Image (cartoon, grey):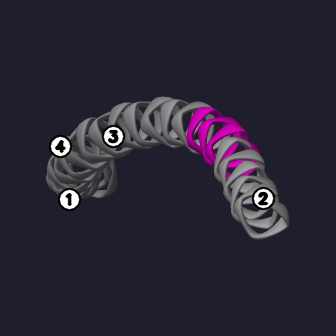
Amino acid sequence: MAAEQDVFDQLEQRIQRAVAHTVQLRAENERLRQELEGLEIRATVAEAATADAVQMKTSLQKLESEVTTLQKEREGVRSRVERLLKQIDSLSTT
């Protein structure tokens, strides 16, 4: 009878440990789910920021191109104005 009681006591202890372990695993699983959710949110934010950065880079490249074009046009206008001023000066000296 004592041996049977020992077997039941051991079985009860093993079941209690299994239950405690299951509770721990469930808590860990919930923590990991919450962590995963947070990481997914951060990944979504990072993807949006990356898309914004790509769009900004494209806009910046376009603006840089426009500035270069405008600088060339300004230099052309400056040259023409200088030529015209020289022609006007030549009229006044003759």
Q: Residues within 10 Å of mark 2 (few under 14, many from 20)?
A: few
Residue 81 visible, this orientation? no
Q: Which comes sooner in the sequence, label 2 or label 1?
A: 2
User: Residue under circle 1?
Assistant: 79
Say the numbered circle drawn on residue 62.
4
* SS type, badge 3: helix
Identify residue type, mark 1.
Ser
* SS type, badge 4: helix
Indicate the position of residue 31 as horizontal and vertical percent values. 67, 39
User: Residue under circle 3?
Assistant: 47
Identify residue type, mark 3.
Glu
Residue drawn at the location 29% of the way across and 49% of the way down: 57
Q: Which residues are magenta?
A: 20-30
Q: Which quarter of the rendering shows the N terminus?
A: bottom right
Q: Residues within 10 Å of mark 3 (few under 14, many from 20)?
A: few
- Measured Cα–Cα span from mark 2 to mark 1: 115 Å
Say the numbered circle drawn on residue 6.
none
Identify residue type, mark 4.
Lys
Identify residue type, mark 2.
Met
Indicate the position of residue 75 as horizontal and vertical percent values. 24, 57
Q: Left or right: 33 with respect to 65?
A: right
- Measured Cα–Cα span from mark 3 to mark 2: 68 Å
- Measured Cα–Cα span from mark 4 to mark 3: 23 Å
Q: Is residue 26 magenta?
A: yes
User: Residue under circle 2?
Assistant: 1
- Measured Cα–Cα span from mark 3 to mark 1: 48 Å
Q: Nearer the viewer, mark 3 or mark 2?
A: 2
Q: Nearer the viewer, mark 2 or mark 1?
A: 2
Q: Nearer the viewer, mark 2 or mark 4?
A: 2
